[in-house]
Image (tube, rainbow, N blue to C red):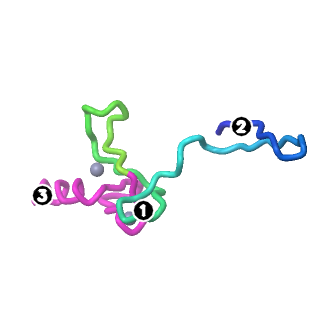
């Protein structure tokens, strides 16, 4: 969280706190509250991190979320 002092008309000031980055959105347009947990070693975070909403996620195990593309790969691996 980052706080900023914002000048208001009339010389007053207000402190506004919040995340600087805009909220991430799922590919369907809903606010993304989840991220794909598929392991992607090439990424710095080590996971896919694709933003997902509860409607679009695939849950292969409790606490895990997969984007549609990686859910398909996961299913293919399982046979
Ligand atoms: Zn979605
Ligand atoms: Zn993914």
Labels 1 & 2 near each other (Cβ < 8 A) = no
Q: Nearer the viewer, mark 2 or mark 3?
A: 2
Q: Mark 1 falls on what kind of element?
A: loop
Does label 1 or label 2 sit earlier along the sequence?
Answer: 2
Crowding at dot 3, Cα within 10 Å, few <14 / some 14-19 / many 20+, comes out as few
- Please state the horizontal and vertical placement of residue 3, each as a whole percent of the image: 71, 37
Please name the residue that numbered disc 1 is placed on: 53
Please name the residue that numbered disc 2 is placed on: 3
Does label 2 or label 3 sit earlier along the sequence?
Answer: 2
Q: Name the quadrant of the C terminus.
A: bottom left
Q: Nearer the viewer, mark 1 or mark 2?
A: 2
> Farthest bottom residue?
55
Q: Going by the image, does 56 lie left or right of 23?
A: left
How much space separates mark 1 and mark 2, taking CA atoms? 27 Å
Q: Mark 3 falls on what kind of element?
A: helix
Up/down of 69 relative to 21, above or below: below
Q: Mark 2 falls on what kind of element?
A: strand
Magenta residues span 51-79
Please name the residue that numbered disc 3 is placed on: 76
Up/down of 19 relative to 32, above or below: above
Q: Nearer the viewer, mark 1 or mark 3?
A: 1
Residue at x 26% of width, y 33% of height: 41
How much space separates mark 1 and mark 3, taking CA atoms? 23 Å
Labels 1 & 3 near each other (Cβ < 8 A) = no
Residue at x 74% of width, y 44% of height: 16
**Front-most of residues 25 and 63:** 25
Q: Is mark 1 within 8 Å of ligand 1?
A: yes
């Amino acid at each position: 969280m980052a706080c900023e002092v914002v000048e208001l008309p009339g010389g007053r000031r207000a402190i506004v706190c919040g995340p600087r980055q805009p909220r991430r959105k799922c590919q369907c347009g809903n606010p993304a509250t989840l991220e794909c947990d598929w392991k992607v070693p090439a990424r710095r975070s080590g996971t896919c991190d694709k933003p997902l909403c509860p409607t679009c996620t695939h849950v292969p195990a409790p606490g895990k979320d997969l984007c549609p593309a990686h859910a398909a790969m996961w299913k293919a691996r399982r046979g």
